[in-house]
Image (cartoon, rainbow, N blue to C red):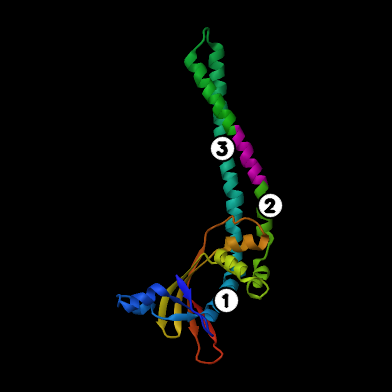
Amino acid sequence: MLTVSSGRTPSLYCAQCTQACCVSAPDALRHKGSVSASGIKEMLLVALRELLSPEVVEAFKDRLRHRLMGGVEEEVAKIRRLHALARQSMERLARVLSSLESDDPVLEAEYRVKQMEYRRLEETVTELESRQEIFNRAALEKQLSVDPLPLLDKVFDGSQPPEKVRAVLARLFPKLIFKGKVNRATAVFELSYSPGAAAALASDTATLDDDPLVRLVQLRSGAKRPTEWKIVWL
């Protein structure tokens, strides 16, 4: 967990790692140091643009199409097959019962079970078809048509209150793990980014895909002032 220090140039550091240095933990030196808050802001800005590239967005949309359309359609097809088998079993039992000269309590009970199963599956098919229609008309159309980048540019333009910016960043980047510093000027982070959250925020819909992209990123500061930051994907 990163802690923000106060002062003219705010920085972030790992309090647990600092404590590890104090007690000479075996891996303490790898984690020692802090990172400028402005550098992390620059890293997140670059990450947003890199991770919202046409290639990444299109890959996400392909996955979304499969999940919303293919996934539901496969489930509907499976339930329809079970529904048809239940109907066949029910009809077969009905023919057997009608051919008997006397009542058969066992077969009659089996027929009622199949009848209940048939009705349950019929309700399930209707529900899935309704869900499929909703997905196609609402979430699918919105999230597949929206371009997240112009809307997400507003995150850092100063127009949003800090609490809203924090909430948005927490959804876009579920995890930001400080992996340590290679040297005084170079820090390494593990960044988890959620394309599903980006599409949901941009389209004002619920998140439909929770799979994150996980990348290692190196943040380097130059010697010039004002500081120039270099972001390298590992």
> Is residue 45 located in the magenta-colored stretch of the structure?
no
Q: Label 1, on which residue?
A: 46
Q: Amino acid at mark 2?
A: Ala
Q: Which residues are magenta?
A: 122-133
Q: Secondary structure at mark 1?
A: helix
Q: CA distance from mark 1 to mark 2?
A: 31 Å
Q: Label 2, on which residue?
A: 138
Residue visible at 52% across and 7% down?
102
Tell me the number on the disc at residue 79: 3
Answer above or below: position of 139 versus 17.
above
Q: Amino acid at mark 1?
A: Val
Q: Residue furthest bottom?
A: 224
Q: Percent x, y for residue 190?
A: 46, 71
Residue visible at 66% across and 42% down?
130
Q: Nearer the viewer, residue 153 or 70?
A: 153
Q: Secondary structure at mark 3?
A: helix
Q: CA distance from mark 3 to mark 2?
A: 23 Å
Q: Are marks 1 and 2 in contact (CB under 8 Å)?
A: no
Which tag, 3 or 1, sits closer to the chain's start?
1
Which tag, 3 or 2, sits closer to the chain's start?
3
